[in-house]
């Protein structure tokens, strides 16, 4: 019996070591920043790591067997936080990125969290998981943070459906969006990173009621970008468009996302009620075309899918490259 236990332990040790440490280091080692030529002080390069849908575990994640306040949930949160922090520390930080861009769904149940105390506790866990060593500067503040600051805002992000809900819920509970923005920043922004303009857009509002505050605010932001494009297209830097919901794809055939995808391409689904959009896998065709015409990006990054996809989009003769983890997340609620 003892020999059997010893053999079992010996068999498990390399498996645990691989999944807890070696896999992250191997992934990091297999990635290299591209060698760029022709960068200047006026158009410098910048290193940006992109993370999709971390969905920090909370009381909404496993409600059937880990309800709020239970020791089961506390244990799951502890293990999940440790795993994500280890992945970030071993796979991302060794590459020494200057910024980290999150493609939405920072928290699992932000859209269902009514009380601010619970939201703040989960947000603090997110900040501890993705904490950044050293001194950094926030997008929302001009003052540098201390080495112990829990808000390492070399972070940028956009809203996801797990953060603020799909359009119908976000419109019904605007305080959820405002609370998320007060903690993690606005979702509509242009930020110069190196020689590129990163354009974040609140995709959750694009197919919503055009009379809602979020939709009017988002489309006003997008239309202003279109005006800028027409006025100064020759001199403006390349744009990277960032949304949580991906753009619709011209083809849903197997293999259309590239060789690195694990599962089949998800077919487009949108569920609407009299209250508006309650579920969607992609932006609608019309809103996506309007967004592309206004922003004219060189690259599009999106989340939501939990799998890898590379696609190209053509608008008015121009081809835009889209990458991401983004069609629908396969868990029933996006």
Image (cartoon, helix red, strand yellow):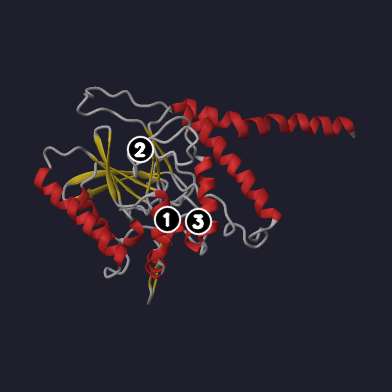
Name the residue located 79 percent from the left edge and 33 percent from the top edge. Answer: 8
Q: Residue furthest left?
A: 231
In this view, 169 is above or below 187:
below
* Above or below, comparing residue 10 to residue 140 in the picture: above
Q: Quadrant of residue 328?
A: bottom left
- Labels 3 and 2: the sequence-earlier one: 2
Q: Position of residue 118 (x, y in %)?
A: 55, 57
Image coords of residue 309 (percent x, y): 40, 45
- Residue that mark 3 sits on: 330
How many marks the image carries: the answer is 3
Say whether residue 182 is left or right of residue 55: left
Mark whose residue sits in front, 3 or 2? 2
Local crowd size for mark 2, using a 10 Å CA cut-off: few (<14), some (14–19), many (≥20) = few
Q: Which mark is residue 180?
A: 1
Q: Name the side, left or right, on which 209 lies relative to 228.
A: right
Determine whether the residue tagged by mark 3 lies in a helix, strand or loop.
loop
**What residue is pinned by disc 2?**
143
- Mark 3 and mark 1: Cα distance apart in space: 24 Å
In the structure shown, which secondary structural element does the residue marked by tag 1 occupy?
A: helix
């Amino acid at each position: 019996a003892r020999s059997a236990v010893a053999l079992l332990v010996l068999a498990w040790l390399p498996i645990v070591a691989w999944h807890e440490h070696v896999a992250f280091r191997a992934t990091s080692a297999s990635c290299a920043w591209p060698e760029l030529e022709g960068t200047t002080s006026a158009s410098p390069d910048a290193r940006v790591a992109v993370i999709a849908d971390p969905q920090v575990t909370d009381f909404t994640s496993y409600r059937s067997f880990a309800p709020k306040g239970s020791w089961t949930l506390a244990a799951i949160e502890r293990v999940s936080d440790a795993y994500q922090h280890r992945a970030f520390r071993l796979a991302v930080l060794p590459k020494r990125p200057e910024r980290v861009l999150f493609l939405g769904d920072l928290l699992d149940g932000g859209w269902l969290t009514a009380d601010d105390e619970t939201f703040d506790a989960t947000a603090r866990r997110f900040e501890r998981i993705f904490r950044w060593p050293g001194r950094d500067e926030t997008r929302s503040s001009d003052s540098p943070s201390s080495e112990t600051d829990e808000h390492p805002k070399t972070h940028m992000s956009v809203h996801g459906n797990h953060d603020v809900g799909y359009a119908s819920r976000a419109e019904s509970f605007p305080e959820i969006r405002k609370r998320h923005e007060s903690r993690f920043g606005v979702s509509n922004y242009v930020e110069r990173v190196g020689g590129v303009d990163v354009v974040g857009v609140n995709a959750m509002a694009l197919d919503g009621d055009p009379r809602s505050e979020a939709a009017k605010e988002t489309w006003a932001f997008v239309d202003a970008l279109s005006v800028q494009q027409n006025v100064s297209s020759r001199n403006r830097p390349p744009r990277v468009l960032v949304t949580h919901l991906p753009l619709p794809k011209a083809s849903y055939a197997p293999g259309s996302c590239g060789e690195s995808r694990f599962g089949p391409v998800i077919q487009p689904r949108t569920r609407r009620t009299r209250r508006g959009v309650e579920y969607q896998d992609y932006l609608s065709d019309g809103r996506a075309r309007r967004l592309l015409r206004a922003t004219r990006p060189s690259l599009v990054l999106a989340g939501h899918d939990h799998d890898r996809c590379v696609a190209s989009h053509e608008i008015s003769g121009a081809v835009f490259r889209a990458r991401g983890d983004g069609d629908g997340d396969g868990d029933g609620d996006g």
